[in-house]
Image: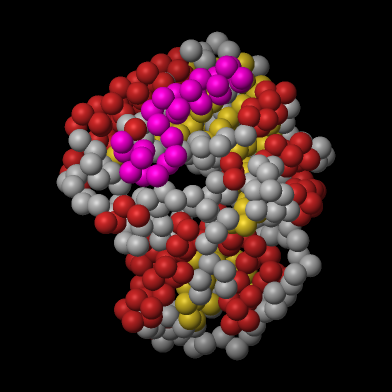
Amino acid sequence: MRTKSTGKKKINIVTLGCSKNVYDSEVLMGQLQANGKQVVHEGHGDIVVINTCGFIDNAKEESINTILHFVEAKNRGEVEKVFVTGCLSERYKPDLIREIPDVDQYFGTRDLPILLKHLGADYKHELVGERLTTTPKHYAYLKIAEGCDRPCTFCAIPLMRGKNVSTPIENLVIEAEKLAKKGVKELILIAQDLTYYGLDIYKKRALGDLLLRLVKVEGIEWIRLHYAFPTGFPEDVLEIIKNEPKVCNYIDIPLQHINSDILKAMKRGTTHEKTNALLDKFRYMVPDMAIRTTLIVGFPGETEEKFNELKNWVREQRFDRLGCFTYSHEENTGAYVLEDDVPQEVKEARVEEIMELQSQISWEKNQEKIGKVFRCIFDRKEGNYFVGRTEFDSPDVDNTVLVSAKDTCISIGEFANVMITSAEEFDLYGELA
């Protein structure tokens, strides 16, 4: 067994799940650093804090396996303490205490001050916008609201994150300015629902007002919108995307399904016809907008006929980016009372069908880009290539632009114009223009 350190303890933050969790971990790390603590992200430390995800079965399994891994390391004397926070801990705290009692303490999603106390730190209210970012220095997530007021029957997020709470515009501008001074050029706006932003504090949808303030921040060159709910989407935002060069012609809008009966059972507040009308409006207002969406297959009642309607719709709409997931039957959600009547193997086969179709669409769209020049930002060098993105691509989830590093030098975190010379399903190849 390792001899325990008597010196300054290093705290290792381990992040699982979505970009909202990444943001929360960055805030935690900023608070710890301001308290004079040594902190690392997914490195080695005497104390481990695991920021968990509890959204769907696969995410829960990953979180539990990670907890067990560090508990075993603790029992071997390789770490001194293990703390667990985040969505899984918020949702299943009593069960986790019973099943994995060797964790030193469990915390929920809104327990940051208490967690800091257990780490020997004080919560500093004055640290508005202060974070220790874990993304490459040229881009960062900006979480504009916490929680969600939507009633979607498949989703457990309100159980774990609570009601929607918007962050005031003034605070977000301060945070953006601090990020810009650190070299951030691209802001990725995130929330459970961007569309709802401002209704709780301004009594109106204020995403457009926020964007008009953020585009004035010196140093920020791209602003990208993630996770916009389709119902009630504010039209002024489309005008801003069209007219403001800093706001990327890109939107991530999870549509989930297209069959009206399924949408009604999901409580999405829309129909097949209304969804198509919204997409038509997007494309009319911003003709070159890249639309990213996510879909759920295997929701209760999804017959072969309803799935074929979804598949035909994907073929017709030709989304620029698309992700597809199997339905997860989550306790305490509205859909849990429904019979989970689509077998898992059928769900998985349907995901494969959708993604195979989307792969072909993506290949065809990428062929159209050959010979064109795009402004790209470069995230990293990987093997023999510099890896970048156009304004139509978000990091980690979308297409990449690859430029040979053999006879070219590109500064990471900088913009460059690239002529596309060839293309695959999800990668573009090019050379500096």
Q: Nearer the viewer, residue 409 or 118?
A: 118
On the picture, is 361 further left or further right than 22? left
On the picture, is 337 further left or further right than 166? left
Colour mapping used in the image? secondary structure
**Magenta residue check for 431:** no
Q: Nearer the viewer, residue 137 or 333?
A: 333
Identify the residue at image location x=60%, y=38%. 225
**Magenta residue check for 277:** yes
Identify the residue at image location x=53%, y=67%. 109
Find residue 92 and report its image quarter: bottom left
Identify the residue at image location x=46%, y=56%. 157
On the picture, is 393 further left or further right than 426? right
Q: Position of residue 283 (x, y in %)?
A: 55, 19
The answer to whether residue 386 of the structure is visible from this angle is: no
Q: Position of residue 310 (x, y in %)?
A: 31, 29
Q: Quadrant of the C terminus?
A: top right
Report the number of discs. Answer: 0
Identify the residue at image location x=79%, y=51%. 170
Q: Position of residue 98 (x, y in %)?
A: 33, 82
Q: Position of residue 418 (x, y in %)?
A: 62, 21
Q: Quadrant of the N terminus?
A: bottom left
The residues colored magenta run: 261-288
The rendered magenta stretch, by its main secondary structure, is classed as: helix
The answer to whether residue 94 of the structure is visible from this angle is: yes
Q: Farthest top residue?
A: 371
Q: Is residue 122 above or below residue 325?
A: below
Q: Is residue 414 above or below residue 41?
A: above
On the picture, is 27 further left or further right than 281? right
